[in-house]
Amino acid sequence: MRTYGPSGFSSTRFFSSPGRICRALVLALLPLASVGAHAEPQKVWVAGAYSFSDELGGFRITSASGIGTKEDPLVITEELNSATPVTLTIRTTKPIQPFGTAGQFANGLMYMRIDVLNNSGQAWVEFQFELQEILHRPSVFGDGLSFDQRNKTPDNIGSSSFADFDRDFEPYDRLLFKSGKIDPLKTAKFDYLITDYTPRWTFYLVQDPRIPSS
């Protein structure tokens, strides 16, 4: 019979002391814990001049592509397993240069398409996005980060599942899609332009699916 104890311990001494039993069990399980810890490494998706991460939990990114132009938007495909807010972490992977070439620089202009699978088991009747330069802190009007706040009549905002939208720029940068529904196991597309005229290395996109209030 194999004895899973540290080398140098006889079987007689190993089983004669409860303290030694616990210590030996810990040593034996350490390799297994190490394997478990590395079984599912953090996945970071890179597209254009940015990386996208679901590290804050609550959802799963399944793909990312594009460079961020109107012709080739950044397309992030996700799966949400509940009707609670989740946060996408966005980081620059290329040098920052306002209005530089998309894909080569983080230029402050990001045409986005978010494809979301509703795997929550509940229908969503609204869906809101919120930008944050600092996690859990509202992005104020003057920080340069917004859903294209300089454009008063945007033609680049739309959804496959919602007919209308509202934008709020003070004290939050929020984009709310409404007048529609996403049923369980259905996918919805959201298109919009994110502008950041004072680009940061990291910012956040909060995504909040809404269910009926009653």
Image: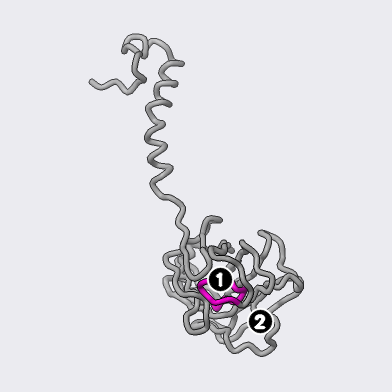
Are circles 1 and 2 on residues that touch, CB within 8 Å?
A: no
Q: Main SS of the magenta segment?
A: loop
Q: Residue at x 59, y 89 (%)?
A: 155
Comes first in the chain, label 1 or label 2: 1
Q: At which x and y percent is residue 131?
A: 65, 69
Q: At which x and y percent is residue 28?
A: 37, 27
* Amino acid type, label 1: Phe
Q: Toward the viewer: 142 or 211? A: 142
Q: Residue at x 43, y 74 (%)?
A: 186
Left or right of residue 211, residue 41 in this image: left
- Return the residue at label 2: 166
Query: For numbered disc 2, what is the local secondary structure?
Result: strand
Instruction: Give the quarter of the figure containing the C terminus.
Output: bottom right
Q: At which x and y percent is residue 89?
A: 57, 61
Crowd around label 1: few <14 · some 14–19 · many ≥20 (10 Å): many
Residue 110 lies, with reference to residue 152, above or below; the image says above
Query: For numbered disc 1, what is the local secondary structure?
Result: loop
Find residue 105 and name its label.
1
Is residue 88 on the magenta stretch?
A: no
Give the magenta-colored segment's residue range. 100-111
Instruction: Give the quarter of the figure containing the N terminus.
Output: top left
Q: Residue at x 51, y 73 (%)?
A: 103
